[in-house]
Image (tube, rainbow, N blue to C red):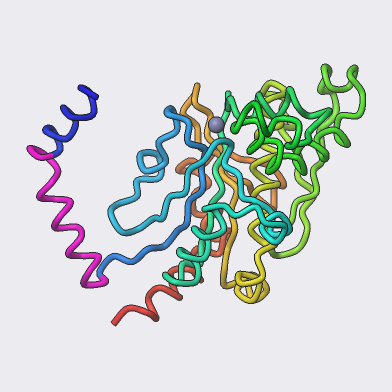
Amino acid sequence: MDKILRGVVKYNLHDKVRFVNDIDKFTKKIVQPQTVFISCMDSRVLPSKFVGSAIGETFYVRNAGNMIPHHEDYLAGYISSEGGGLELGCIVNEIRNVVICGHSDCRALYALYDMRKECDHKLYHQKSPLKTWVALNGRRTANKFSQLFPDEVKRNNFVDPVIFDVNLGQGHVKALIDPENDFCIQDKLSQINCLEQASHVTTYPLLQPFIKTGELQIHAMWYDVYTGNVYLFSPSERKFVIVSDSNVTSLMTECGCNSCTGVLKEKQP
Ligand SMILES: [Zn+2]
């Protein structure tokens, strides 16, 4: 706890006044929440740092493996905080931008990779809450991964680009998974999972009216912990691309950021 408590003392000295002032901006609606950001809970992944969000701008939901439980599982009785987080962000606070963020070297996805051939959460219920969670919410990812990599030879030699069918709310996209073959098999699974979990957002009926009109945007982001590169899935390029100065304007246009901003401006007093 020493590190945590010393952090509070440092915060008292350097940041507390600024944070309180920022809350005032939020209260006066100068700043409004714009994004629900769902990421893995990994300690190396610090989204508020790499997306530069300030107080009041982003609702964060973090869990092992950046999972969004499918709405079918919610109906089957598997209550989770993620569905509640989507409702709190998108309905109660009228946020129209959802980002699912995966990352490289994800230990939850390594667990999913090891379980991929027998991805039944009931097998792990008594032994491991982590494996139960990952198997339950990652089984659709694992099933699709097994379809994409049906044989061991192909799995170990990535000659051909792998195509993954993803629905981010505005029709299906045939995604190319790591076509440059830069990443290991578990990282490829992590990118597939990121897209699969993003597609689960579309399964929630209370969000569907906003998704159908294009008012609610769903994005898949991926973070490489070893290079620090931040990737965004580009529907036009059909793959994760590194976000940089050179492409940020085109990515903003592609993501419909202008329409998001327009919605927020209309709601300001
Ligand atoms: Zn992770």
Give the quarter of the image for residue 240: top right
Q: Percent from the top left, x then y, of residue 98? A: 53, 57
Which quadrant of the frame does ligand 1 lie within?
top right
Camera-nearest residue between 134 and 241: 134
Camera-nearest residue between 93 and 170: 93
Residue at image location 35% in from the left, 39% down from the top: 49
Above/below status of 261 relative to 172? below
In-image side of 19 versus 47 (left or right): left
Residue at image location 62% in from the left, 28% down from the top: 128
Q: Percent from the top left, x then y, of residue 199? A: 69, 54
Give the quarter of the image for residue 143: top right
Camera-nearest residue between 132 and 223: 132
Residue at image location 14% in from the left, 43% down from the top: 15
Residue at image location 20% in from the left, 65% down from the top: 25
Q: Is the magenta stretch mostly helix, strand or loop?
A: helix
Q: Percent from the top left, x then y, of residue 119? A: 78, 33
In-image side of 21 versus 162 (left or right): left
Above/below status of 154 relative to 121? above
Q: Single out the residue that lies furthest toward the left.
A: 13
Q: Single out the residue that lies furthest toward the front.
A: 126
Above/below status of 230 relative to 256? above
Camera-nearest residue between 242 and 24: 24
Q: Percent from the top left, x then y, of residue 132? A: 66, 35
In magenta stretch: residue 18: yes
Give the quarter of the image for residue 155: top right
Above/below status of 170 relative to 65? below
Q: Give, as a single range, the part of the protein colored magenta.
A: 12-29
Q: How many labels does the image show?
A: 0
Quick one: quadrant of the C terminus?
Answer: bottom left
